[in-house]
């Protein structure tokens, strides 16, 4: 059989494994491939963005809760408990000045920890400085009282004034600390909450994942009909990456949120004595590994780039086959 010269470009241009030119013309197939490529890239980008924002919405507060808010609440609980014990040592039937000084010292150290955790911002730091000054004055009054004879009126006056400095409504040391504690507990609850915006973000992310999975499946079926290829492994890899990554990150988010909610619940309310120590151990357990899981947000960006690369490369060779094929 004789081969015409006009047939050579088509014979030379055909690659092993390349799809056959469909009956409706290469331009239609090239257009269909381009539409699917743009759809996959758009859905991949939107899924990456939505997942990143939703993930950060939960994990972005995990580290501040673990390193600042929860320790600050525990420090304020400790200070309140120690000052209460100090007052008992100062005014009890059998006063103990050494015990008083020990409890006041622990309270002062706890307030220094709270200040280091930036309780309440600049206003909170100012309030803690005021409380520290009041504690100094309170300590001085108690020490003066114990220098006086037990039955002296001056001793009673010093103790009465010291008690007023500690407990006066609104202006006393304990009311000021309780107000700071309530504010910090509110911050902690806000950080641990899973509000409507987060529900919307995760719902939108799940819908985008379903849309991308459906688009990848439809594209696989399209390629099977047009090119008689059973699987496109790059698109299959994109499907596995998107679904697997979403499931893994959703589990990370569930563990982190559960720990954050447990911490907020555990520290909601006044604690004293050994209960403070147990609460510290419990919150450390609840928030364990939250820093590692929060760092996974960088994986979302990397995974999104890889996902788009898989979608692009999975269709690019077929698009190029039609773009550069002689008509």
Image (spheres, rainbow, N blue to C red):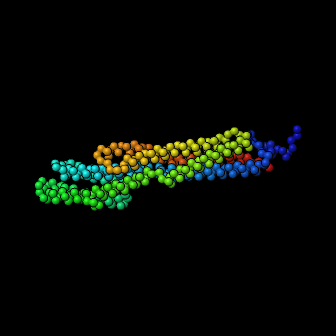
Left of 11 or right of it: where is 61? left
* Residue sitting nearer the eye, 107 or 317: 107
Q: Is residue 137 above or below residue 66?
A: below
Left of 120 or right of it: where is 4? right
In percent of width and height, residue 306 lies at 59, 46
What residue appears at the point 53 percent right and 47 percent down from the top-left corner? 299
In percent of width and height, residue 99 lies at 21, 48
State the quadrant of the N terminus.
Answer: top right
* Residue sitting nearer the eye, 96 or 125: 96
Q: Is residue 138 above or below residue 263?
A: below
What residue appears at the point 16 percent right and 49 percent down from the top-left corner? 93
What residue appears at the point 70 percent right and 44 percent down from the top-left corner? 222
Q: Quadrant of residue 133?
A: bottom left
Q: Does residue 294 appear in the picture of this structure?
A: yes
In percent of width and height, residue 9 lies at 81, 46
Left of 326 or right of it: where is 132? left
* Residue sitting nearer the eye, 187 or 170: 170
What residue appears at the point 25 percent right and 57 percent down from the top-left corner? 167
* Residue sitting nearer the eye, 124 or 2: 124
- Among all residues in the image, which is located at the extreme right? 2
Q: Does residue 105 appear in the picture of this structure?
A: no
In percent of width and height, residue 277 lies at 32, 44
């Amino acid at each position: 059989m004789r081969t015409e010269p006009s047939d050579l470009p088509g014979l030379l241009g055909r690659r092993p494994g390349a799809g056959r030119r469909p009956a409706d013309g290469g331009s239609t197939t090239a257009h269909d491939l381009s539409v699917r490529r743009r759809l996959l890239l758009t859905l991949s980008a939107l899924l990456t963005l939505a997942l990143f924002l939703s993930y950060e919405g939960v994990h972005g507060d995990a580290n501040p809760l673990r390193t600042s808010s929860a320790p600050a609440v525990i420090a304020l609980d400790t200070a309140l408990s120690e000052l209460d014990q100090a007052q008992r040592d100062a005014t009890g039937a059998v006063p103990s000045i050494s015990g008083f000084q020990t409890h006041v010292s622990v309270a002062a150290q706890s307030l220094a920890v709270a200040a280091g955790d930036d309780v309440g911002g600049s206003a909170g730091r100012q309030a803690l400085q005021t409380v520290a000054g009041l504690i100094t004055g309170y300590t001085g009054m108690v020490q003066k009282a114990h220098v006086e004879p037990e039955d002296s009126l001056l001793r009673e006056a010093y103790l009465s004034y010291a008690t007023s400095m500690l407990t006066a409504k609104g202006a006393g040391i304990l009311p000021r600390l309780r107000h700071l504690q309530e504010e910090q507990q509110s911050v902690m609850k806000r950080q641990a909450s899973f509000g409507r915006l987060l529900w919307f973000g995760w719902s939108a992310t799940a819908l985008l994942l379903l849309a991308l999975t459906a688009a990848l499946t439809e594209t696989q079926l399209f390629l099977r009909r047009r090119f008689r290829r059973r699987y496109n492994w790059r698109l299959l890899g994109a499907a596995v990456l998107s679904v697997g990554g979403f499931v893994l990150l959703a589990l990370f988010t569930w563990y982190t949120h559960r720990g954050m909610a447990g911490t907020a619940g555990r520290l909601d309310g006044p604690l004293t004595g050994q209960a403070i120590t147990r609460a510290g151990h419990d919150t450390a357990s609840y928030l364990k590994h939250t820093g590692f899981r929060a760092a996974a947000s960088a994986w979302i960006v990397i995974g999104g780039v890889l996902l788009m690369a898989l979608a692009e490369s999975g269709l690019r060779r077929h698009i190029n086959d039609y773009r550069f094929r002689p008509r």
